[in-house]
Amino acid sequence: MTWLVTGGAGYIGAHVVAALRADGAGVVVLDDLSTGLKERVPDGVDLIVGSVLDRTVLDAAIADHRVTGVIHLAGKKRVEESVARPLHYFHENVEGLRVLLTAIAEHGVGSLVFSSSAAVYGMPDVDRVTERTPCAPLSPYGLTKLIGEQLVAATAAAHPFGHVSLRYFNVAGAAGPALADRGAANLIPMVFERLSAGLPPRVFGDDYPTPDGTCVRDYIHVADLADAHVAAARRLAADPATALVVNAGRGVGVSVREIIAAVGEVVGDPGLRGVVEARRPGDPPRSVASADLIRAELGWSARLDVRAMVESAWAGWRR
Ligand code: WQD
């Protein structure tokens, strides 16, 4: 198969490209380089610089490279920005997907893997979130992902193609320093940013109903997440009628304080603690996946732990 990876020059996308290539698949990348970096695209992989909103570019990419499947990671992913600019998020994430689905249907592309998010669940009041937990996104970002999943399923019902939506939990780490996350928009890079400025990490609230009072998340190594895409790609190649929505997490809850302690160990400051600040609006106290369905359906489960995430992220940060 030949996979078109949209957003393949991004942090997660570049890991997906590397994992697909290691699995022997053909890959072509479409990325508008708004946040992606062309240095992340390996030699031997064609990079088409353009947007999924551009039908002309999509048609040429699919036809010229005989694309048989699409892995769609291109999109906007900052929750706060989505609150300030909801229509921009709808344009990029929903309209971008609509244009892509039109091309998929017209070219008869047989498979789609869609990047969804744990943000579809909103404030889940359960120990582990299963795919049956009701979806109630709190942000325009989460809403675009939920609508995206539904748009994929509705389109596939009318113009058959196989599809897997992966609901990413909290992605961290890097497969190598060159592939590391360059933005400091999530907890681990934000801790590094504070340490680099000579400041203590910030803890957004320590009065949550959790064991140590700080928020609990399901952190997943980006290399493991990339392998989940390969597992989805293999499943779609074997069974073109696949229609799945699955959590992509480890099923392990880790608190903000535990992450800060892990960073302290890795950077040689074992007593590292944060300064407590106000809660960040909209943060769920706990968001941890049930990873049972993805294991059963795709035969995938995560291998790497928080230590591996923090060490690899730190190596990339210091590069
Ligand atoms: C994790 C925890 C913070 C920074 C979001 C989206 C999700 C996905 C990943 C895109 C929270 C706390 C953070 C800091 C802190 N996005 N924190 N001090 O909010 O769980 O998930 O990003 O695909 O959809 O919702 O991730 O890394 O921002 O925060 O205490 O300096 O760390 O309050 O509890 P979040 P995060």
Image (spheres, helix red, strand yellow):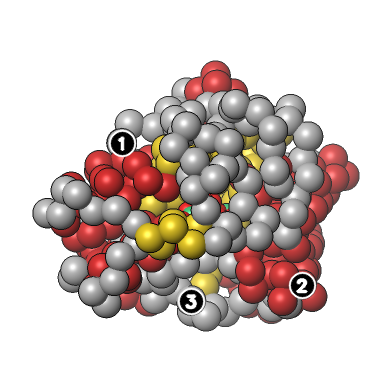
The image position of residue 224, as x and y in percent, is 38, 40
The image position of residue 246, as x and y in percent, is 62, 34
- Distance CA(mark 2)–CA(mark 1): 34 Å
> How many residues crowd mark 3 within 10 Å: few (<14), some (14–19), many (20+)?
some
Residue type at tag 1: Asp
The residue nearer to you, when weighing 141 against 243, is 141
**Residue at the spot 63% in from the left edge and 46% down from the top edge:** 284
* Quadrant where the C terminus is found in the figure: bottom left
Residue type at tag 2: Pro
The residue nearer to you, when weighing 175 against 66, is 175
* First in sequence: mark 2 vs mark 1: 2
At numbered mark 2, what does the secondary structure look like: helix, strand or loop?
helix
Q: Is mark 3 within 8 Å of ligand 1?
A: no
The image position of residue 189, as x and y in percent, is 35, 63
The residue under label 1 is 305
**Residue at the spot 52% in from the left edge and 66% down from the top edge:** 7
At numbered mark 3, what does the secondary structure look like: helix, strand or loop?
loop
Give the label, 1 or 3, closer to the camera: 1
Q: Which mark is residue 232?
A: none
- Distance CA(mark 2)–CA(mark 3): 18 Å
The residue under label 3 is 35
